[in-house]
Image (spheres, rainbow, N blue to C red):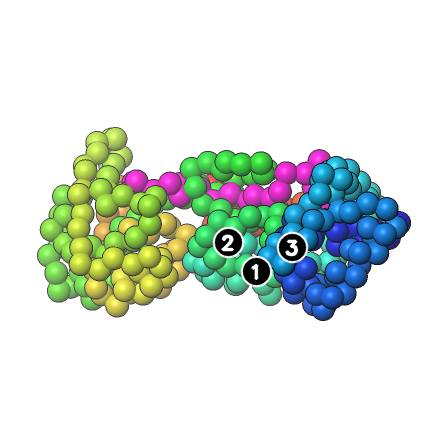
């Protein structure tokens, strides 16, 4: 039986839409429909229950899907393992990450990735929403959080430190920030997300904590827009170090409390590499995980 047709069946079962699968494969929906119909004819069973508004798997389709997913996984991994002996990773590598992390941390790596993996086609899906890895055919995700839940495999890429930054121009024209409590006197730039608290906590080398209940008149849901506002001198804000590392090195921003560790109620305390739970890890994903871990630990010293 044609393995490509079986994979198409699995895609349709996951997406529950001929049109969606057709877009994924750059084909006409009628072609996808005919392929599934021919598979049903060959098997002698109805795999999908179709109506004008939706389509769902039949009981027989559910049973067939469960068996075929396992079979396809075994076949794909057998091919991957055979190729890994003498060949380089091939095919498409679909990676998802937040817009900020993708733009500042992943996109600059594309020249090196193209050189390291010349036979791979890279697709970056950048979104601040946590999309489903299976239905979106994602090979690898970079997610930020204290832990990763769900039926996935996760490995830590690096721990995340947070720092309070402001532009040199802002600091020249506003009250000095010499100690944590001084931050409260400023109109801070605030990040709007459910996982972030507007109570920041500074901890010095001896472990003493200072609570800073901050407030401000600019609240933004985009971390990149917030970063630009800080560069433009609109106030201090709390950022992950990976986001502002280059700005601090170039002098565009200043770490106003360099002798303190900062917490801000953030759930994003680490960056994780996440991939769908499978019995075997595809060779291309394993190679990409190794590359990213070496890159960020070696070059960034954040772990």
Residue drawn 24% across the image and 42% down it: 200
Estimate the spatial distance between the alpha carbons at disc 3 and disc 1, rounded to whole Å. 34 Å
Q: Nearer the viewer, mark 3 or mark 2?
A: 3
Total tally of numbered discs in the picture: 3
For the record, the magenta segment spans 263-285
* Image position, residue 283 (x, y; %): 72, 47
In the displayed structure image, the side of residue 163 where residue 53 appears, left or right: right
Please tell me whether residue 3 belongs to the stretch shown in magenta: no
Label 3: few (<14), some or many (≥20) within 10 Å?
A: few
Measure the alpha-carbon separation of dots 1 and 2: 8 Å
Q: Which mark is residue 77?
A: none
Residue to which mark 1 is pinned = 124
Categorize mark 2 by other alpha carbons within 10 Å: few (<14), some (14-19), many (20+): many
- Secondary structure at badge 2 equals strand
Q: What secondary structure is marked by label 1?
A: strand
Q: Secondary structure at mark 3?
A: loop
Q: Is residue 271 magenta?
A: yes
Q: Which residue is mark 2?
A: 97
- Residue 106: where, in percent of width, then height? 52, 58
Which residue occupies the foreground of this view, 226 or 52? 52
In this view, the residue in front, 31 or 246, is: 31
Instruction: Give residue 11's position: percent from left, percent from top.
Output: 69, 52
**For residue 88, above or below residue 203:** below
Q: Residue at x 44, y 54 (%)?
A: 128
Q: Is residue 116 left or right of residue 192?
A: right
Q: Which residue in the protein does label 3 denote?
A: 51
Contact (Cβ within 8 Å) of mark 1 with mark 2: yes
Residue 110 appears anywhere in the view:
yes
Nearer-N-terminus badge (1/2): 2
Quarter occupied by residue 221: bottom left
Q: Residue at x 15, y 64 (%)?
A: 172
Q: Is residue 4 left or right of residue 210?
A: right
């Amino acid at each position: 039986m044609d393995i490509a047709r079986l994979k198409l069946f699995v895609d349709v079962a996951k997406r529950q839409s001929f049109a969606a699968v057709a877009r994924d494969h750059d084909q006409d929906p009628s072609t996808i429909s005919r392929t599934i119909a021919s598979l049903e004819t060959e098997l002698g069973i109805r795999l999908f229950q179709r109506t004008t508004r939706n389509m769902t798997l039949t009981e027989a389709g559910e049973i067939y899907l469960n068996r075929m997913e396992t079979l396809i996984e075994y076949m794909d991994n057998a091919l991957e393992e055979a190729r890994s002996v003498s060949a380089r990773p091939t095919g498409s590598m679909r990676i998802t990450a937040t817009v900020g992390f993708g733009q500042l941390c992943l996109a600059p790596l594309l020249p090196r990735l193209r050189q390291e993996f010349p036979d791979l086609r890279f697709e970056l899906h950048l979104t601040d929403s946590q999309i489903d890895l299976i239905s979106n055919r994602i090979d690898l995700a970079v997610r930020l959080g204290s832990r990763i839940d769900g039926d996935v495999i996760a490995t830590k890429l690096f721990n995340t430190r947070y720092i309070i930054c402001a532009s040199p121009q802002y600091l020249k024209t506003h009250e000095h920030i010499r100690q944590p409590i001084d931050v409260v006197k400023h109109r801070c730039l605030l990040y709007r997300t459910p996982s972030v608290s507007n109570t920041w906590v500074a901890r010095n080398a001896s472990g003493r904590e200072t609570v800073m209940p901050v407030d401000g008149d600019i609240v933004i849901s985009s971390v990149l827009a917030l970063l630009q506002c800080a560069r433009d001198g609109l106030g201090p804000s709390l950022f992950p170090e990976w986001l502002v590392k280059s700005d601090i090195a170039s002098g565009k921003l200043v770490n106003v409390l360099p002798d303190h560790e900062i917490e801000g109620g953030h759930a994003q305390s680490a960056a994780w590499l996440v991939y769908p739970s499978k019995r075997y890890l595809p060779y291309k994903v394993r190679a990409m995980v190794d590359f990213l871990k070496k890159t960020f630990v070696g070059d960034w010293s954040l772990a």
